[in-house]
Amino acid sequence: MAATKLTEEKDLPFDMPAVELPVIPDEEFNIVDFGARGDGRHDNTSSIQAAIEACSMQGGGTVRIPAGIWRTGPIRLQSHMRLHAESGALIIFNSNRDDYPLIFTSYEGLRTVRCIPAIYGADLEHVAITGQGVFDGSGEAWRPVKRMKLTDGQWQKLTNSGGYVEGGTWWPTEMSLKGASLVKSLIAKNIQDPAAFRPARDHLRPTLVQLDRCRYVLFDGPTFRNSAAWNVHPWLCEHVTIRNVSIRNPWNSQNGDGLDLDSCRYANICDSVFDVGDDAICIKSGKDADGRDLGAPTEYVTIRNCQVFHGHGGFVIGSEMSGGVRHVYLTDCVFIGTDAGLRFKSTRGRGGTVEKIYIRNVRMKDIGKEAIIFSSYYSGKNNTEEAVPVTEETPVFRDFTIRDTTCVGAGRAVLIKGLPEMPVQNVLFDNVLLAARTGAACANAEHIVFRNTTVIPEQGEAFTVDDAEKVIIPE
C-alpha cells in the first residue's frame, strides 16, 4: 500500500489538513501458512496471531484471510500492518467469554475496564482493515434483550434457551445480570485494576473493533456485524479513514451503535452503509468530568455519501461530548427509517462545547420521531426546567448550519430544546423542506434562523416558539 494522502476537501467551510492514509509494506502473510483452517469449526486464534506476529517481526505487511469460515478469539493488531479479509471470508469470533480478558480502555465516554475488543489495537501507527470479508462479533452470546423488542414467539424461544430474566430484560448469564451494580461502584471509586472487575466480566461486553490512541488508520471494504456492544470505536485516534464499509447490528441490539468516532481528529468517513440497533454515525468526546479532564475534542471530520437504514439516530453528536466537538462537515447522506434523523443530545453534568457543525444535502424518509433534534435534556436526572448556575458542567450547542436538506415523513419536523441557563445558539436552516406529523418547536433557543425553509405539518402549527429569542421564521 503506497504512501499517499487523500484528496484535500475543496468545499469545506473550514480549513482542514489532508487526512493521511497508512503506509503498509508489500510483504504478505497468509494465515493458512500458519496452520489456520477455514472449516467453521477449528479455533484459529493462535494461527492468526502467529501470522500477525510474523508480519510485525518483518517490519509489517498484509495478513491475508482467504475465503472460508474462520473461528477465532480476539485479534491483536500491530503497527504497519493490514488485515485483509478476502471476498468469501467470514470471520466469526468465539462466544466463549473466557477468551476475552479484561483490559483498561474506554467505553461510553469513561476510561474504564472492559473485555478486550474482538479486534483491538493500542498505540499503533499505520494500520488497516480491508477487503470484502465479513467480521461477525457473535454478539448474541453477550447482549441483554428487552422483552418489548421481541414478538411473543421470539421471547419464548429466547427464554427457553436459558439465561435469566429480570424487569422485562433477558440476560445470557447471571454474571451479566448482576454485574452492573459492581461496575457502577468500582467506577465511582475510580478503581482501574482489571482484577477488581473480574466478578462482573460478562457485563463488560466487548466492542467489535476498537483502536486506542492510533494514527494513520484505514477501514476499507469489510462488513462488521453483530457486535456485543458498540461496533466500530476509534478512540483518541488521528488520521482516520473509513470508507466502503458496511456496519450492521440487529435492530434490537442493546448498545448496538454503528460507528462511534470518539475524541478523534482528522477523519474522513464516506461511501458506507449502516443498519444498526442504536445510534448509527455517532461523534463523541468523553463523558462528564472524565471527558473534561482528558480534554480531547473530536474535530476536523468529514462524512460523505453514507446511508443509514435503521438506528436511533442517523447522524448523532453526544451525549458523551464533554471534551468538545467542532469542525464537522456532513453531506450527501440518506437516512431511512431511523428513530431520529439528525440528533444532537447532551445533559447537565456533561459540559463541553459542540460548535461549527455544517450539514447539507441530507435526505430523510420515514423518521420515527424528530427529523432534526437538539436536546440538552437527554438523561432523566437533574432535568429541572428552572435555570441553574452555568458551570463547567453546562453543555453548549452553538453555530450549526443545516442546508439543502429534505425529510418526507417524520414524527416531528424539528425540536430544539436547550437549557434555560444555556440556550441552543446560532442555528441556521437554509433551503430545508420537512414534512412531518407535527411542526418545528423551539424552546430555550437564541438566534435560530429558518431561511427558505418550509415545514409541512399534518396537524398543528408549522412553527411554535417558547422562551426563545431572535428566532426568525418564514412569513
Image (spheres, grey):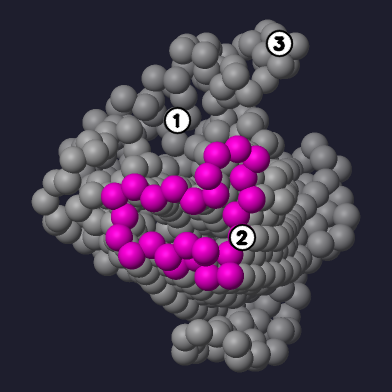
Q: Which residue type carries mark 1?
A: His
Location of mark 2 (residue) = 454
Indicate the secondary structure of the residue bearing disc 3.
Answer: helix
Q: Is residue 36 visible?
A: no
- The picture places residue 154, in percent across and down from the top left corner, at 72, 16
Image height of 214 relative to 254, above or below: below
Instruction: Choose top left, top right, bottom left or bottom right for residue 264.
Output: bottom left
Of the 4 image quadrants, the one containing the N terminus is: bottom right
Which one is earlier in the sequence, the residue at label 3 or at label 2?
3
Image height of 454 relative to 197, above or below: below
Indicate the secondary structure of the residue bearing disc 1.
Answer: helix
Q: Are marks 1 and 2 in contact (CB under 8 Å)?
A: no
Question: In screen coordinates, is 329 left or right of 347?
Answer: right
- The span shown in magenta is 449-475
As measured in the structure, the alpha-carbon distance from the residue carrying label 1 to the one carrying label 2 is 47 Å
As measured in the structure, the alpha-carbon distance from the residue carrying label 3 to the one carrying label 2 is 42 Å
- Name the residue nearer the viewer: 322 or 126: 322
Q: How many marks?
A: 3
Location of mark 1 (residue) = 203
- The picture places residue 315, in percent across and down from the top left corner, at 56, 57
Location of mark 3 (residue) = 152
Which one is earlier in the sequence, the residue at label 1 or at label 2?
1
Q: Which residue type carries mark 2?
A: Thr
